[in-house]
Image (cartoon, rainbow, N blue to C red):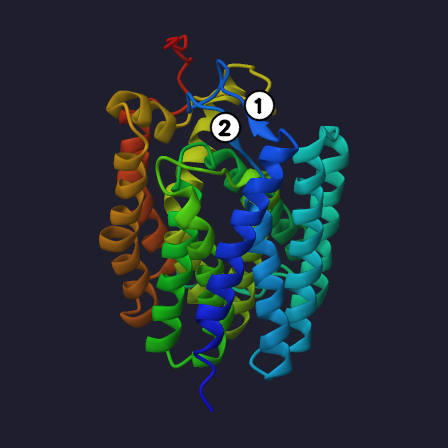
């Protein structure tokens, strides 16, 4: 029996829910008003990422009912992702102190790891390393960093949607070529959920994702990468490669700001993609470039890791090196120039 009909269903749910949330945000004045730290110039409704989360919860229910995902993965994604989406939704409506958000992030990470089984043995330059219980802590930091960097990188129209769609569909291709068809459904339906939202978020965006959506995506993508790594160790490296644009820009920017002694938790607009969007004067060229980098650079390297026995660690080095060069070229982490008022 084919379950392909689920794809347009969850796309439609996400599409319609985003429209509803846009009306809700406008009626409740939940608007992202431009300021000196913004990359946009028009007040725009926020919180549309809730539609992605709700559509994906429907997807998970359908996948569990049809036996296409395990009970463990269902509870890992629904519980961990749902908590992050709820925290983000509450923060979008009213500020939550950073320490409480961080506590919720780590709680969700350990929930996910409890169901998935923690960090599997990883192969580093040909050596298999089993970190045991230490791996739980390392994996928790990985999940928390991934969800936060996804939030940091959701700063211009469409970029977070394009990254999620490319990573998910890229992973589906890797799974199919590697004979891991059973893993395809979760990322495939997540891509469909994001695509339904992306219609409204395409530059110029009519609604923003908000913390509820960006944090949710970071947590779920991280969980999917760990799940795949339990079945095939190279898949963890492949996911890190597919998410390379976000990982490199966010990490490089954070480190430079830390070394300058800045408060890294404060809002800023010093990521490479933000400098690039100001240089080009539009968001679309930068968002499109992210998609092209994913398709023509990162995906082929991930294929080499999973199908041609390229060592995963070397694959990451190869994939990230030009991304670091781009981060330097576009001044990632530099002191910001004053915003120009229109």
Q: Quadrant of the C terminus?
A: top left
Q: From this viewpoint, which residue is outermost toward the left?
A: 296
From what the image shows, is residue 130 above or below residue 326? Answer: below
Task: Report x, y in % for residue 7.
Answer: 45, 71
Disc 1 secondary structure class: loop
Front-most of residues 211 and 246 = 211
Front-most of residues 287 and 181 = 287
Task: Report x, y in % for residue 3.
Answer: 47, 82
Q: Residues within 10 Å of mark 1 (few under 14, many from 20)?
A: some
Q: Quadrant of residue 303?
A: bottom left
Do the residues under discs 1 and 2 have CB atoms within 8 angstroms? yes
* Residue at 30% over, 71% down: 307
Q: Which mark is residue 264?
A: 1
Task: Report x, y in % for residue 214.
Answer: 54, 44
What residue did someone put label 2 on?
A: 254
Relative to 122, is 83 on the left or the right? right
């Amino acid at each position: 029996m084919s379950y392909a009909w689920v794809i347009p269903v969850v796309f439609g749910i996400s599409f319609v829910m985003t429209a509803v949330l846009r009306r809700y945000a406008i009626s409740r004045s939940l608007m992202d008003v431009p300021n000196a730290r913004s990359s946009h110039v028009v007040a725009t409704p926020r919180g549309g990422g809730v539609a992605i989360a709700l559509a994906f919860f429907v997807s998970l229910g359908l996948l569990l009912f049809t036996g296409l995902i395990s009970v463990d993965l269902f509870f890992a994604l629904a519980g961990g992702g749902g908590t992050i989406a709820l925290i983000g939704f509450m923060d979008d409506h009213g500020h939550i102190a950073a320490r409480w958000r961080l506590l919720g992030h780590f709680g969700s990470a350990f929930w996910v790891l409890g169901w998935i089984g923690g960090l599997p043995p990883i192969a580093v330059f040909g050596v298999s390393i089993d970190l045991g219980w230490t791996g739980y802590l390392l994996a928790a930091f990985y999940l928390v960093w991934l969800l936060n960097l996804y939030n940091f990188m959701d700063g211009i129209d469409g970029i977070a949607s394009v990254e999620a769609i490319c990573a998910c569909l890229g992973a589906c291709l890797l799974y199919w070529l590697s004979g891991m068809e059973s893993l395809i459904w979760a990322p495939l339906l997540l891509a469909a959920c994001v695509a339904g939202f992306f219609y409204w978020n395409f530059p110029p965006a009519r609604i923003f994702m908000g913390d509820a959506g960006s944090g949710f995506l970071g947590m779920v993508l991280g969980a999917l990468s760990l799940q795949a790594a339990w079945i095939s160790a190279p898949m963890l490296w492949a996911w890190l490669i597919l998410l390379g644009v976000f990982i490199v820009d966010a990490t490089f920017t954070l480190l430079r700001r830390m070394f300058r002694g800045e408060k890294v938790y404060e809002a800023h607009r010093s990521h490479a993609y933000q400098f690039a969007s100001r240089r080009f004067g539009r968001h679309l060229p930068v968002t499109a470039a992210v998609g092209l980098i994913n398709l023509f650079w990162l995906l082929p390297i991930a294929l080499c890791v999973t199908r041609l026995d390229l060592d995963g660690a070397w694959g990451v080095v190869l994939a990230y090196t030009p991304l670091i060069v781009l981060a330097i070229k576009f001044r990632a982490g530099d002191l910001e120039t004053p915003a120009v008022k229109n």
